[in-house]
Image (spheres, grey):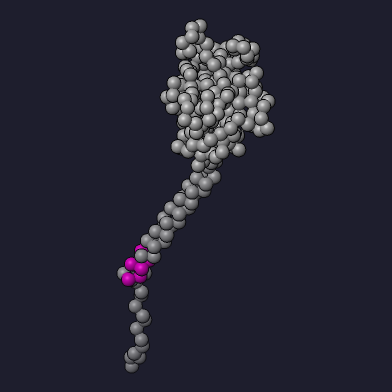
Amino acid sequence: MTVLGTDPPPEQDKKPAPVTLRRRIGIGLVVAWALVLTVVVFTRGSDSDEEQAAPPARPSPSASQGPLTTGEVYQTLLPSVVRIETTRGAKANATSMTESAIGTGVIANADGSILTALHVVANASAIRISYTDGTTSPASVASSDPDNDIAVLSPQKGPETLVPATLGGGVQVGDKVVAIGNPLGLTMSTSDGVVSGVDRDLARDQEGATQGLIQFDAAVNPGSSGGPLINDGGAVVGIVVSLANPTSAGTFIGIGFAVPIGTALGGGGEGDGQTPPL
């Protein structure tokens, strides 16, 4: 009798099924892509760290402000310069003939005090100030220094915006200077030149000599008296008081004189006003 036994199980194929192979390939691609992303992220992070670690750029020093041009000096000082008109020989409201004159002044203090040449306002029966914004005001002599031909005026009112001038110090021969004034009535004219000499003495008719003057060659004429002489930093270094002319014409021939600003501020004789402090 034949005993029917079971057949042994067939030997399994050692090759993976096609489905399993595709899964392994997919997993491998995912892992490879993840590795690529990781490398990219770390590389970018490293670059960012290097950028952050780089030292900041040092700011380069800005160029220092150089001397002002004549036009810049003019624009800077213009709000501080005034036109002075005086009446002599009669009261301001009189109907008789009177003599009028024009000069220049500069606002030298926050209280509105104005420096000018004394001869501009000497013996005036009325003084009127005109500011560059169009405002006008009567004024009076607060103090004076006859030896140096300097006067300080106190106006009854100031301009809408009061701009006192910056006051400077000493000058040397060759320094650039600018004069602003009202020569021959030509309102707010400007000229430039250089300091031609210092510590000059100038004789005046029956009034002795004015000493320690600044000589300059910026053009000035009658009407410029009392105006500021300004350096190339925009600071007033003197008050124009006279010009030299060997004839009686009274016109400019290249030599003007100004009282140094320190001397102008140091005087103050007549009157009960006070000169502006330097």
Closest to the observer, 9 or 160:
160
Instruction: Determine the image quadrant of residue 165.
Output: top right
Residue under the image location 65 percent in, 18 percent down: 147
Q: In this view, does 266 lie above or below 194?
A: below
Question: Residue 213, can we see it?
Answer: yes
What's drawn in magenta, residue-wise?
Answer: 19-25
Assess whether residue 22 is covered by the magenta stretch.
yes
Residue under the image location 57 percent in, 24 percent down: 123
**Residue sitting at the far left:** 18
- Most common SS among magenta residues: helix
Residue 97, x across and y down, in percent: 47, 25
Residue under the image location 36 percent in, 86 percent down: 6
Assess whether residue 200 is covered by the magenta stretch.
no
Which quadrant, please, contains the N terminus?
bottom left
Question: Residue 117, can we see it?
Answer: no
Closest to the observer, 23 or 46:
46
Which quadrant, please, contains the C terminus?
top right
Closest to the observer, 10 or 118:
118
Residue 76, x across and y down, in percent: 49, 31
